[in-house]
Image: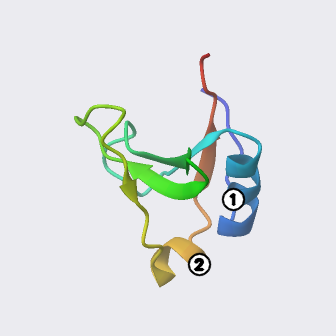
Amino acid sequence: MEYKELNFTEALGEVLEGKRITRLDWKDKRSYGCLKDGLLTIHKAGEAEEKTHMWIVSDSDMVGLDWIALSVDK
């Protein structure tokens, strides 16, 4: 899989374009952030799609340089 590592601001730009984002640092790559009903949410691996949670962004998230955008199959 080919991808470009992004900073948090760049990753949020990808979210605004309808993509999902994840971090290389996250152990389970099935976890991702996205917009749902106009809110930044996080989907944790192993949970149903509708079980997203409001994302409380941490300082670690904001300074991370290992964000990647995921394609969304529609």
Amino acid type, callout 1: Leu
Looking at the image, the residue that sits furthest to the bottom is 59
Q: In which quarter of the image is residue 18?
A: top right
Image location of residue 73, percent across then percent down: 60, 18
At x 56%, y 47%, the residue is: 37
Query: What kind of element bears circle 2?
Result: helix
At x 38%, y 44%, the residue is: 31
The CA distance from mark 1 to mark 2 is 13 Å
Between 49 and 29, the residue placed more toward the observer is 49
Residue 12 marker: 1
**Color style of the picture:** rainbow
| In the displayed structure image, the side of residue 44 where residue 33 appears, left or right | right
Q: Relative to 57, does residue 74 appear above or below in the rendering?
A: above
| In the displayed structure image, the side of residue 7 where residue 70 appears, left or right | left
At x 30%, y 42%, the residue is: 51
Question: What residue is pinned by disc 2?
Answer: 63
Between 14 and 74, the residue placed more toward the observer is 74
Q: Pick the quarter of the image with the C terminus.
A: top right
Q: Relative to 8, does residue 11 appear above or below in the rendering?
A: above
